[in-house]
Image (cartoon, rainbow, N blue to C red):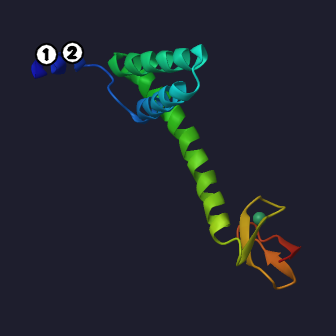
Amino acid sequence: MKQKIMRFMYGRYGVDQLSRSMMVMVIVLVVLGIFFKTKLIDWASTILLILVYFRMFSKNINKRYQENMKYMVVHNKMMAKYNGWKEAFACRKTHKIFACPGCGQKVRVPRGRGKVKVHCPKCNTSFIKKS
Ligand SMILES: [Zn+2]
């Protein structure tokens, strides 16, 4: 039986980060479907599940890999943004974060120092802000 499965999966794409995220979304949709009984949620979860299996058993490995890479680019951007917010939230009482008007670089300044001249370490622009 195990060999049959192995033979079946040979040359097929398998599971990646995109498939795992899609599976999590299917589970979330199924749980939501318990509380909100709408056909839309049922259809969305079914279609998503079909897509997960389609990607898993696909023999077009290169195309599936490209899809996963696109997903990972978006995923990493979102995670970087989320981590920035998390950091800003963690130090919100002690520091203030400003964006450099020249390059957009985030600069962290201690709070309660009145008007301060902020110096951007990336592009050497200076600007005055109230801390
Ligand atoms: Zn700058």
Kind of residue at badge 2: Phe
Q: Position of residue 101 (x, y in %)?
A: 84, 61
Q: Quadrant of ligand 1?
A: bottom right
- Numbered circle sitting on residue 40: none
124 sits to left or right of 81: right
**Residue 60 at x, y percent in the picture:** 38, 17
Q: Name the residue at 55% across, 28% down.
A: 35
Q: Which of these two is toward me, 91 or 44?
A: 44
Identity of the amino acid at label 1?
A: Lys
Determine whether, in the image, residue 22 is placed left or right of residue 95: left
Q: Residue at x 62, y 65 (%)?
A: 87
Q: Secondary structure at mark 2?
A: helix
Residue 48 higher or lower than 107, as above or below: above
> Gap between marks 1 and 2, in whole Å?
6 Å
Element at badge 1?
helix
The quarter of the picture where residue 56 lies is top left
Residue at x-position 81% and y-position 76%: 118
Indicate the position of residue 116 as horizontal and vertical percent values.
Answer: 85, 81
Q: Are there few (<14), some (14-19), or many (20+) residues within 10 Å of tag 2?
A: few
On-image quarter of the C terminus: bottom right
Question: For residue 51, which quarter of the picture?
Answer: top left
The image quadrant of residue 63 is: top left
Residue labelled with disc 2: 8
Could you tell whether 45 is left or right of 126 in the image? left
* Quadrant showing the N terminus: top left
- The residue identified by callout 1 is 4
- The answer to whether marks 1 and 2 mark residues whose Cβ atoms lie closer than 8 Å is yes
Q: Is mark 2 within 8 Å of ligand 1?
A: no
